[in-house]
Structures are given as C-alpha cells and as structure tokens.
Image (tube, rainbow, N blue to C red):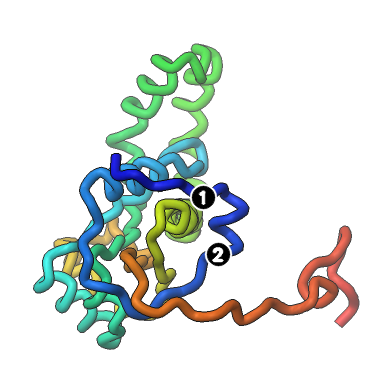
Amino acid sequence: MSAIAELTVAEAILKRRSCKRFKPDPIPRDVLDRLIDLTIHAPSSFNLQPWRIVVIQNPAQKEALANAAWKQSQITTAPAVFVFAVSLNGWEKTLETTIAEATRLGAWPEKFVNFLRGAVPGFQKALASKVREYAAKDALIAATHLSLAAESLGLNSCLMNGWDEAGVKEVIGAKDNDDIAISLLVPVGYGLDIPQFSGRLPRELTVFSEKLPPQ
C-alpha cells in the first residue's frame, strides 16, 4: 500500500470538511481498495448489508451523474464518486452467504443462525413501506465510514444529498428497477481547497439528558 500515515478516528473526525473541488490526481489503486474495505466494514441491521455501492471514475459517467445532481462540481472534479444505492430485497439472495461467512468466522452459533433464518423474513415483511428507510439508514452508516476512512487516508470527501433519484438510477444502470433506491452520493479525492471549520451549535442547544426540553 502507498506510504500513508493513517489518522486516528478522532483525528479524522476533527479534520474532515465537505470538499467541493478536487485536484485531478487519481486515487492510487491500493488506497482505493483500502478505502472500500474500510467502508464495507460498516454495521447493518441483521448484518444484511443492503448497500450496493457503485464507484464511478469514468469521466463520461461522472458527467452524466453530475447532470442528475444539478451539475455540482464536486462530482466532475473528484477522481471517484461513490453512489450508495440500496437493494430493498437483496437479502433474499445474500442471506445464506452472510450466514456462511459469519459461521466460518465463528461469530454466529447454530442457535443464532436458526433464529436468524426464521426472524429476518418476518421482520423485513413487517417493515412494509419502511423497508426503504431501514436500508437507507444502513447505507448512511456505511457512507459515514467512507467519509472518515477517506480522511484518515489523506483524502477528502463530500456527503451529498442533492440529486434526482431517477436520474442517478439511470446512470448506474438501475432505471425502472424498483428494488434499487439511492441513499447518498460521496465524491472522494484530494481536495483543491479545504474549507475552514465553520463551528457547531453550543451543546446545550443540541444535546440533552433523558428527554428533550419543553418547546
């Protein structure tokens, strides 16, 4: 792997900024692989891992994606853009693979595996219209892992929530696929100009003990 002194989690959290413009420098293959590995270590409900991450590096693909995201420059200038899509029912095909890997690692005993096989289908069905919400939450957790991992590896990123879903789905080859939903876009690369820290609200306005205060 390229010689990089990785930041600690705390250092990455404190250093991270939303970067809107990137240098043209490509991300080395080994760094990109490391970034992906750290991203997919994210936790998810029942470890179902509903994210379907599309990494876009082709200039024409990035241009098409930017057109679906109001032509925001971070998409076209970043060397790589991570599209965090989710598969709403993909677990039906991957559950046994998930179980096999967890069993191989000694993480899930047979009793828990039997419970899981019975519980997951019922839980997912009971979610009904909330199945998209739950999958999107898992993808957002993975995207946060990506953002902090990128910072730790000397990269910059921008968590984006401004785009047309139908347009993004068409770009990634999921047009008219009702199983796929879009959770987030994250351009990643070496920042051209890094914004200064803009501060945060005082803790007494956003953090409370036990209950929210009266409105």
Tell me the tag on residue 162.
Answer: none
Q: In the rendered structure, are the residues bearing label 2 and label 1 in contact, judged by CB atoms less than 8 Å apart?
A: yes
Q: Is residue 212 left or right of residue 192?
A: right
The CA distance from mark 2 to mark 1 is 9 Å
Q: In the image, what residue type sits under mark 2?
A: Lys
Task: For the C terminus, give its image quadrant.
Answer: bottom right
Which residue is pictured at 35% across the width and 39% down the height? 91
Image coordinates for residue 141, horizontal then vertical, percent: 50, 53
Whether residue 166 is visible here, answered yes or no, is no
Answer few, some or many: residues within 10 Å of disc 2's Cα (few below 14, many 20 plus, some between 14 and 19): some
In the rendered view, tell whether residue 103 sits above or below residue 161.
above
Task: Determine the image quadrant of residue 161.
Answer: bottom left
Which residue occupies the foreground of this view, 207 or 12?
Answer: 12
Which residue is pictured at 47% across the width and 36% down the height? 47
In the rendered view, tell whether residue 150 sits above or below residue 69.
above
* Residue with the mark numbered 2: 15
Which residue is pictured at 44% across the width and 40% down the height? 41
SS category of the residue bearing label 2: helix
* Residue with the mark numbered 1: 7
Answer few, some or many: residues within 10 Å of disc 1's Cα (few below 14, many 20 plus, some between 14 and 19): some
Image coordinates for residue 143, horizontal then vertical, percent: 43, 57
Q: In the image, what residue type sits under mark 1?
A: Leu
Image coordinates for residue 103, horizontal then vertical, percent: 43, 16
SS category of the residue bearing label 1: loop
> Which residue is farthest left?
60
Image coordinates for residue 73, horizontal then vertical, percent: 28, 83
